[in-house]
Image (spheres, rainbow, N blue to C red):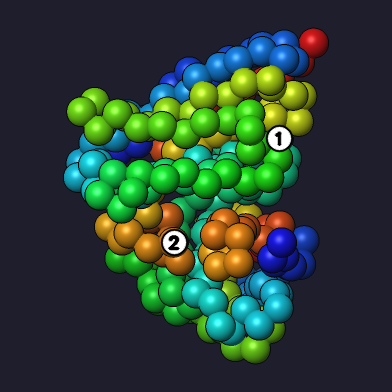
Amino acid sequence: SYVLTQPPSVSVAPGTTATITCGGNNIGGKSVHWYQQKPGQAPVLVIYYDSGRPSGIPDRFSGSNSGNTATLTISRVEAGDEADYYCQVWDSNSDHVVFGGGTKLTVL
Amino acid sequence: EVQLVESGGGLLKPGGSLRLSCAASGFPFDNAWMSWVRQAPGKGLEWVGRIKSKADSGTTDYAAPVKGRFTISRDDSKHTLYLQMNSLKTEDTAVYYCTTLYPTSSSSAYYGYWGQGTLVTVSS
């Protein structure tokens, strides 16, 4: 089955840029979606189809996808961005949805 | 406004059965592909399965850990999604979220709307 690999944690200072990666075999050929989840809350979509941004999501959030790595970039990080972030793709071979293991973003 | 409201969670013993419900509103439920996603305590998100709209065959697919034990169904007249869980195991303990691929009907699409989740605890 298809596997997505994320770093367990990323720590950055406020005002800097956070980069969260999502690795997978030829992930550049798939559509990647990203979710933010704060403690006790349901996930919220922050990036769709690699780089699309839903309404209401700040333009500080951006995404890219190429080769074997998709990336979620959060610019000018704020304390309120502290959360778990998950990448997600659809595996056409199994016709199943796959989530990455999640990355905990800590704002120092 | 799109709303997804899960119910039916609870505490039960291994081997037991439980049915979760998800009441949907604010969008054309009968055209929507629906899914269940779960999250064990302190763990990440795990896809449970999906049901397509009847217009798109109404077929279901399940993740390997639940296939043969869980059944997803829908009642379009009631705008409700169900998850029948049988032969429950301790590792099924999780918050179960109802979510939808609306407004798209594509396997590669994103989950734009989520319910608040319902907790299922399986323990002896």
Mark 1 or 2, which is nearer the eye?
A: 2
Question: Farthest bottom residue?
Answer: A67
**Residue ID at (69%, 22%):** B88
Q: Which residue is denoted by mark 1 in the rendering?
A: B41
Secondary structure at badge 2 equals loop
Question: Farthest front residue?
Answer: B57
Q: Which residue is denoted by mark 2 in the rendering?
A: B107
Chain letter of disc 1 in the image: B
Q: B101 or B10, which lies in front?
A: B101
Q: A93 or B49, which lies in front?
A: A93
- First of labels 1, 2 by sequence position: 1
**Residue ID at (71%, 61%):** A1
Chain letter of disc 2 in the image: B
Q: Within the image, what quadrant is residue A13 found in?
A: bottom right
Residue B53 on image: x %, y %: 31, 46
Visible in this render: residue A22?
yes
Residue A32 vs B110, above or below: the answer is below
Residue B68 on image: x %, y %: 63, 33
